Image (cartoon, rainbow, N blue to C red):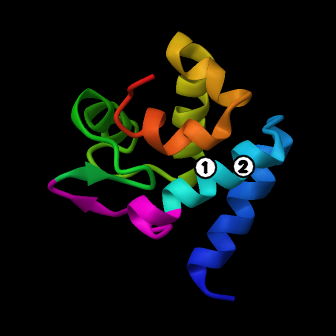
Amino acid sequence: MPCAQALAVCMTLWMGSHGYPKPLQAAVLDYVKHESGFEAGKIVSTGACLFQWAGVRRRRVLALGGGVCPAWEAQMGFMDRELRGEDCFRPLWARPERFRDCFGMMRC
């Protein structure tokens, strides 16, 4: 099994154990596939890590890893805290089809 596929399975299991409904799981996986190709350590000029965070979010996630992308589990925890803690992201639990439009640019 290729690494990207294995990570997608692991991420799916993680989300399932954290109460993510299937449609939101699929939206997250689609987003990560598009953004980083499931490369947990990918850092480019426009973004960093699985979700290709930018700006303040990039600095925060890289700080978790001491200047590099943290383990995928830590990145999932970072995403989870944002989805549960930021008011603008709460509607995504009911409307996961908006994940790409809303989460990436932190626009809701």
- What segment carries the magenta color? 33-45
Is residue 99 toward the left or the right of residue 9 in the image? left
Residue 86 locus on image (x, y percent): 52, 15
Whether the magenta-drawn stretch holds residue 80 is answered as: no
| 93 left or right of 35 in image | right
Q: Which mark is residue 25?
A: 2
Q: CA distance from mark 2 to mark 1?
A: 5 Å
Residue 44 point in image, percent of width and height: 21, 60
- Write the residue at 75% across / 56% down: 12
Q: Secondary structure at mark 1?
A: helix
Contact? badges 2 and 1 (CB < 8 Å): yes
Q: Residue at left 70%, top 54%?
A: 26
Q: Amino acid at mark 1?
A: Val
Residue 84 in the figure: left or right of residue 23: left
Q: Which mark is residue 28?
A: 1
State the residue lying farthest toward the left: 45
Q: Residue at position x 38%, y 54% from top?
A: 49
* Marker disc for residue 101: none
Is 40 in the magenta? yes
Is residue 31 depicted above or below 88 in this figure?
Answer: below
Mark 2: which amino acid? Gln
The correct choice, above or below, for 87 with respect to 39 in the image is above
Q: Is residue 19 left or right of residue 58?
A: right
